[in-house]
Structure formats: C-alpha cells, structure tokens
Image (cartoon, grey):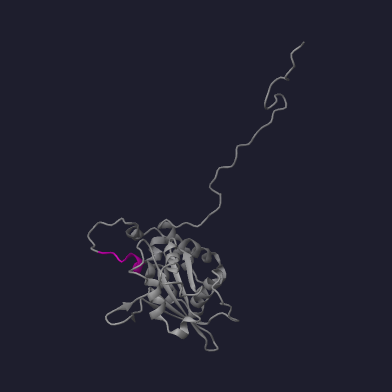
Amino acid sequence: MLQAIHQGKSKIYRRYLGERDGTEARVAEEDELTALLLGPLQFMPERNAALFWHQLLLEFEAPNYCPDTSPEGVCMKFWPSFSAGPGQRVEPDLLVELSWSDGKTLKLIVELKWRAPLSGEHQLHRQWRHCLTNKEQTAAYHLFIAPETSEAQAALSSDAGDIWKGRLLRISWYELMGLFDQSYLELGAWPEMMAHTLDCLGIHRFKGFGSLNSAPEIVFSEQRPVFWSSPIHSSET
C-alpha cells in the first residue's frame, strides 16, 4: 500500500484525515497506520530492522543506552495481549525485542497515536506494569509516538507518577522523520515511501527555502542617484 500511495495510485490515506463515505461503522485508524507505516520493518532482514530501532534509541538519547555493538536480531510483535488482572487485558501497538550476539536482549514497548486520545486512564502506566517483568523494566524503553506528545508528558505528571525513571521516550512523527535521511540504515525504499505518506497526512519535513523567489536585482544607475535627484541646499540667510 505504501507503493500505491507513493506513486499516486491510491488515496486511501484520506480515511485517516476524516474523509470517509460513512459506510464503515468504525475505522481503526491507529491500528491501520501502525501496520501501514511500521509493518514493512517486519519483512526486512533482522539486522537492518534492528539497526533502525538501535539508531532511534541513540537519536533520542535513551538514558543508559550505550551498547558496545549494534543489535543483530529483532522480534516484532504487533498488538500482543497481556493479562492485567481478572477479565482485563493490555494491548500495546508493538512489542520489539532486540538481541545481541552475546545473548543480551532488550525490549521496547511502542504506542502510536494518531487522532485519538489514550485509551482509558493510565494506559501507558498499565502497559509498562503489565507488559514487562520487573527485571525487563530495568533495561526496557517505552516509546510514545504521536503527532504531538503532550499526553505522554501528562502521564509523567499524573497522580500515578513517573514509573519509567526516564525510560518513557516522547517522539513526534515529525521528529521520527529525521531518521529517514540516514542512508546507512540500509532500509531500502521504505523511508522515502513512509515520509511521503506522512507528508500526505500533513506531517511535513523541513525542505529548506528553495521554493522562495529570489530577491529582485537592483540596478544602480550612474546617471541618477537612488534616493534623490538633486543635492539639498540650505536656505540663504
């Protein structure tokens, strides 16, 4: 679908801008966007996909993340479900597990938002508490990716407290697009197509001032002064 959007063969992205015909009772915008934008990573060579998440953690200065080498493996699970007590489930958008050749592993909880608020009270707190063991929490990170990240800041300041101790990373879609210009990530055509799709959704990268017209050329005449045509004489007394 990214190819169809990128080459102008589909306008399906308009459904995420509220342009629908009303025949669908419910559109799972965030789930569809999660699959559309991040799903391709699951089909790439593990080392390449792992390098993307590795570089994301470095770019956004994840605290205490300074491995000696890049991860070589990755396991990505979309919408995994965890028990949160009798009759209650917690389902983050994505759970990523990075792995190194020495056996070390690290987990990332990824929650993506589009136009809807967080689901229920303390959604991010519930994800952190129920999707990770106490041991995993000491090294894991929680990524909140949205058009703007005020809800993550609100979670940090809520009555439930900052349980992440710096491990909740607030990332806007605009900021995430900055990674796509780094060609060494070796992610093929995906970054360009993802950036184009986000552009269609109103999230634009800064492209410089190339579209501005140049200033008109000023021609100075040797025959006429620019500001006046004759000298100013003081009145005779």
Residue 55: x, y in percent? Answer: 54, 72
Residue nearest the observer in this picture, 85 or 18: 85
Residue 136: x, y in percent? Answer: 46, 83
Figure check: 81 above or below 27: below
User: Going by the image, does 209 lie left or right of 193?
Assistant: right
Q: Residue furthest bottom?
A: 103
Residue nearest the observer in this picture, 203 or 197: 203
Q: Residue furthest front?
A: 159
Residue 191: x, y in percent? Answer: 48, 66
- Considering the image in quadrants, where does the N terminus appear? bottom left
- Considering the image in quadrants, where does the C terminus appear? top right
Q: Residue furthest right?
A: 237
State which quadrant residue 16 falls in.
Answer: bottom left
Residue extent of the magenta highlight: 26-32
Residue 182: x, y in percent? Answer: 56, 67
Judge whether residue 155 is colored magenta: no
State which quadrant residue 229 falls in.
Answer: top right
User: Going by the image, does 125 lie left or right of 20?
Assistant: right
State which quadrant residue 199 falls in.
Answer: bottom left
Question: In the rendered image, is residue 189 in sight?
Answer: no
Residue nearest the observer in this picture, 44 or 234: 234
Figure check: 216 above or below 141: above
Q: Residue furthest top?
A: 237
Task: Identify which residue is drawn at 43% across, 73% down.
Answer: 110
Task: Identify which residue is drawn at 50% across, 71% down.
Answer: 187
Total marks shown come to 0
Figure check: 100 above or below 231: below
Question: In the rendered image, is residue 71 in sight?
Answer: yes
